[in-house]
Image (tube, rainbow, N blue to C red):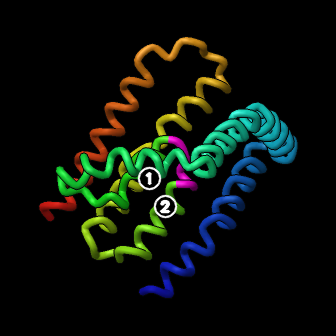
Amino acid sequence: MTAFFSLLSAAFIPVMSAMIILYGLLKKAPVYDYFIAGAKDGLKTALEILPFLIGIFLAVNGLTASGILNLIYEIFSPVLSFFDIPAQLLPLMFLRAVSGSGSLIILQDILESTGPDSYAGRAACVMSGGCETVIYVLALYFGVTKVKEMRHALKGGLIGYFTGIIVSLAVCRFI
């Protein structure tokens, strides 16, 4: 059965590509021209997104390299210990809203230091899967679409983000 799923996953993209090309040829559509137009649009989108990606990347690296996360850790660790929340989760709580890939590095560090079956490891995994990169998404989407007024997007996103943190801590504590 595992071999079947392995074959299915390996063949999925080539089979889907062939089906799309075949469908286009049957409809007598200029498949190659559509592909080139789509590739051009994709490159334009990538160029529009690039400055925002660079800005977020520099901000995340600046936060981690400057030691601000260590300062935040020192300030909030007594509060976390009062609520019996592992202090290792604090960098993940702050960075996950900004960077998905940066938070995966922190997740790896948590899993290596505490283990995947620990409360901190389980909570970190649930947080990584259940919390959105709110700041990254807002900066990227609003920057690319050139929308100046975020209205309630930031507040709503942060409320959802903190709700995800609380729920992940509660679920992992009681299950």
Q: Residue at x 58, y 50 (%)?
A: 64
Verify CB contact (< 8 Å) between mark 2 and mark 1: yes
Q: Residue at x 73, y 40 (%)?
A: 54
Residue 37: x %, y % from top left: 83, 37
Q: Residue at x 47, y 69 (%)?
A: 109
Which contiguous range is marked in magenta? Answer: 98-102
- Residue 160, above or below 170: above
Residue tagged by mark 2?
A: 106
**Image quadrant where residue 21 sits:** bottom right
Q: Which quadrant of the figure contains the C terminus?
A: bottom left
Residue 91, disc: 1
Label 2 – label 1 distance at C-alpha: 7 Å
The answer to which of 10 and 47 lies nearer the viewer is 47
Q: Is residue 43 above or below residue 121?
A: above
Q: Position of residue 141 (x, y in %)?
A: 59, 29
Quadrant in the picture for residue 161: top left
* Quadrant in the picture for the N terminus: bottom left
Does residue 92 appear anywhere in the picture?
Answer: yes
